[in-house]
Amino acid sequence: MSALPKLPDPAVNPQKTRKGLDRVWHATLISLHGLRAGWSEPAFRQEAVMAIVMIPASFWLGRGWVEVALLAGSAILVMIVELLNTAVEAAIDRIGPEWHDLSKRAKDMGSAAVLLSLALCGGIWLAALWQRFAS
């Protein structure tokens, strides 16, 4: 007799048992809780304030929908990567406060991802500003 795979306990995560629009509604609420949690991080707040300025500015600076999408998307990408970095840091901190090489490595890579997203955003915006004003 073979062992059957164990099904997840619905009491552990009720989201797993939801279907249809009920699942979509609760997933949206969970995402809003995540944004609220992200807002408690100073780096995310700074990036969000910058995005509030940059996204409308992208419609003025971009000369077509592709440029607008790149400009606005790069600002949003920075916030996405920051939220993922914060999630990694929270998961590592949940494991324990003691220093471990793998924990440091995970946090350093998350930070590097934020740095690369900022560099990409800055490069896109500098190129668009250069095209708009220098040529």
Image (tube, rainbow, N blue to C red):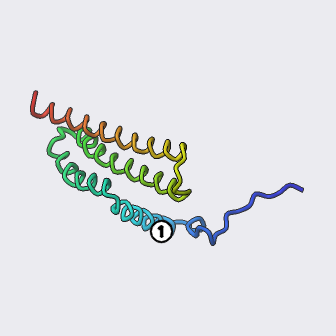
Picture quadrant of residue 95: bottom right
Residue at the disc numbered 1: 26
Q: Position of residue 91 (x, y in %)?
A: 51, 55
Where's residue 103, x and y in %? 52, 47
**Residue 46 location, x and y as percent?**
26, 54
Q: Residue at x 39, y 63 (%)?
A: 37
Q: Residue furthest front?
A: 98
Q: Residue at x 49, y 67 (%)?
A: 21
Q: Which amino acid does label 1 sit on?
A: His
**Looking at this rendering, what residue extends furthest in the bottom direction?**
11
Q: In the picture provided, is 73 more to the left or to the right than 52?
A: right
Q: Is residue 72 above or below residue 127?
A: below
Residue 109 location, x and y as percent? 45, 41
Q: Please name whichever residue, 85 or 28, is drawn nearer the observer in this view of the structure.
A: 85
Q: Is residue 16 above or below residue 82?
A: below
- Quadrant containing the C terminus is top left
